[in-house]
Image (cartoon, rainbow, N blue to C red):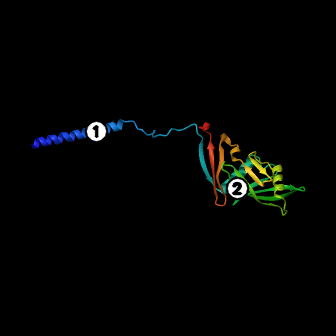
Amino acid sequence: MTNVKWKTLFISLLALNILVILFVTILVNLPTKDKELIPKVSHEEDIQFQIHTNREDLTRLINQYLDKEGLTGSIHYEVYLTDEVELYGTMPFFNREMEMKLTFEPIAQKNGDLILKQKSIAVGKMNLPVSYVMNLINERYNMPEWVSISPNDESIYVSLQDMELKSDIRVKAKEFDLKNDDISFLLTIPSSLQ
C-alpha cells in the first residue's frame, strides 16, 4: 500500500506542476489590457519648458535685448529689476536732457502677459504729472510693438505672447515676484520644429 500512496502522491504532484506551468504559460502569452508601456510621442502638441531665473540675469537679458534690437533709439534708457521694475532714462526739457526714473509693480496676467503698474516717478527735481511723463515716453522712446503704454491708466502692458522670437517660440510669464526673486516663464516651442 505504501507503493500505491507514493504513486498517487507523485502523480498528484506531477499533475499540479503541469497545471502551474500551463497557467503561467497562458498568462505570459495573454495580451496586456493596459496601454503600451512606451508612450507615443505626439507631434500634434507643442513642447513646453518652464524656465526659472533671477532678477540679475533677467535685467541683463532685457537690456541686451533692447540694445540688440535698437530699441533704445536716440534717447537711451535701461531697465533694472529690483523689488520692482525700474526704468532709467533721459527726457528732453527746454533743450536739456533731464534724468528720470520710473518704478513699476509687475503683475503677471493669467494669459502670460505682464502689466507694469506705475508706482513712482522722478524727473530731475521737478514734480510732473505721471500721465504727461508717460505720454512723453510713449512718443519719444522706441518701444517694442508688443509693449503698450497707457498714460491715462499709468501702466504699461507687456504682451509677451506677441514678442517675436526666433523659430516662433512663445513666452508666457508664470511667476513674476520680484520681492522674493521668484521669476518663471513658460517657453512654448511649436511642434513643427520637431
Q: Are marks 2 and 1 in contact (CB under 8 Å)?
A: no
Mark 2 neighbour class, 10 Å CA radius: few under 14, some 14 to 19, many 20 or more: many
Side of 55 where 78 appears, left or right? right
Gap between marks 2 and 1 measured at Cα: 69 Å
Side of 109 where 17 appears, left or right? left
Quarter assignment of residue 178? bottom right
What residue type is disc 2 on?
A: Pro
Which corner quadrant holds the C terminus?
Answer: top right
> Disc 2 on helix, strand or loop?
strand
What residue type is disc 1 on?
A: Ile
Point out which mark residue 106 bears.
2
Mark 1 neighbour class, 10 Å CA radius: few under 14, some 14 to 19, many 20 or more: few
Q: Which residue is more in the foreground, 150 or 180?
A: 150
Q: Residue at x 27, y 40 (%)?
A: 20
> Disc 1 on helix, strand or loop?
helix
Quarter assignment of residue 29? top left
Find residue 47 and report its horizontal and vertical position in percent.
59, 42
Of pointers 2 and 1, the one earlier in the residue sequence: 1
In the displayed orientation, state which residue is furthest to the left: 1
Point out which mark residue 86 bears.
none
Q: Residue at x 69, y 49 (%)?
A: 113
Q: Residue at x 51, y 38 (%)?
A: 40
Find residue 149 and report its horizontal and vertical position in percent.
78, 50
Q: Residue at x 13, y 43 (%)?
A: 5
Which corner quadrant holds the N terminus?
Answer: top left
Find residue 187 and report its horizontal and vertical position in percent.
63, 46
In the displayed orientation, state which residue is furthest to the bottom: 125
Quarter assignment of residue 129? bottom right
Instruction: Give the labeled residue for mark 1.
Output: 21
